Image: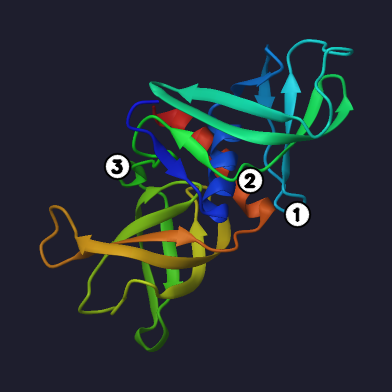
Amino acid sequence: MSGSQWLTRPDDVVAHLFYAAAEIGEAEVESGGMTRVGSMSFPSPETGTFSFFSNSETEGQNPEEGAVVRVRYQHDTCEFAFLTELVEIPTPKRWRLAFPRTIERNEQRLIARHQVHQYGGFRVRLDTGEKGWLSVPVHDLSTGGLSFVFDPGEHALAVGTALAGSLIMPSGMSIPLLVEVRHMRSAPEVPGQQMAGCRFVGLTTTDHASLARKLAEWRTKFR
């Protein structure tokens, strides 16, 4: 892949797998010169695996457990690929695969970031300590993190700061959050304001799956 980007942080790999299962759907798994087409399940951080469901019967043609396989899929013009281990074959149409160490993409972002601020309804509420609670609209959102615009005169945030709080969805559903501020910059078109980019830390499997589904539903509705 020309100009490839690599995803290596374990939490980011898991976030990408949630995104891929919810929003991409079809994938190809290659092994031993044969290719299977099917879909991926949500990942299970507890077991370090996810399932691939083949669209066709493959009994008697499967590779052995422990074999290295290549997984490929794409979204629009973006192509993704990684190598991983075939952990188990519970049924002829279901393979259980280990989380990859790295995921490759031929363009910049490895997790789709949705510009939800254009439509509203998503908010983040975070405890900033002595400065109290910060409650603002979400600017953009992915299965790996979010960003928001804030007034630095009211809340002093720093790169590396961990903040607890919640993400409030348009439906009113609230997801408990722990985020780490990864970067900050001047907010575009809002003089004097800052934009904080954060990654999710320790999001539960259930909440991660709920977020992935809601983002997939949101994308279908507005795109």
Q: Quick check: 110 above or below 222?
A: below
For residue 196, which quarter of the picture? bottom left
Q: Earlier in the sequence, mark 3 or mark 2?
A: 3
Quick one: SS at disc 3? helix
The percent coordinates of residue 185 (x first, y second) are 21, 62
Distance between the Cα atoms at labels 1 and 2? Answer: 14 Å
Q: Are marks 3 and 2 in contact (CB under 8 Å)?
A: no
Residue type for callout 2: Ala
Q: How many marks?
A: 3
Residue at 51 percent across and 65 percent down: it is: 166
**Left or right placement of residue 185 versus residue 161 in this view:** left
Residue closer to the observer: 43 or 118: 43
Dot 2, crowdedness within 10 Å: few (<14), some or many (≥20)?
Answer: many
For residue 151, which quarter of the picture? bottom left
Between label 3 and label 2, give the one nearer the viewer: 2
Distance between the Cα atoms at labels 3 and 2? Answer: 23 Å
Quick one: SS at disc 2? helix
Residue type for callout 1: Glu
**Left or right placement of residue 137 versus residue 100 in this view:** left
Quick one: SS at disc 1? loop
Residue named by callout 3: 118
The percent coordinates of residue 134 (x first, y second) are 37, 73
For residue 42, which quarter of the picture? top right
Q: Earlier in the sequence, mark 1 or mark 2?
A: 1
Residue type for callout 3: Gln
Q: Quadrant of the N terminus?
A: top left
Between label 1 and label 2, give the one nearer the viewer: 1
Residue named by callout 2: 209
Residue named by callout 1: 46
Q: Report the residue that reaches farthest toward the bottom.
A: 130
The percent coordinates of residue 222 (x first, y second) are 40, 30
Between label 3 and label 1, give the one nearer the viewer: 1
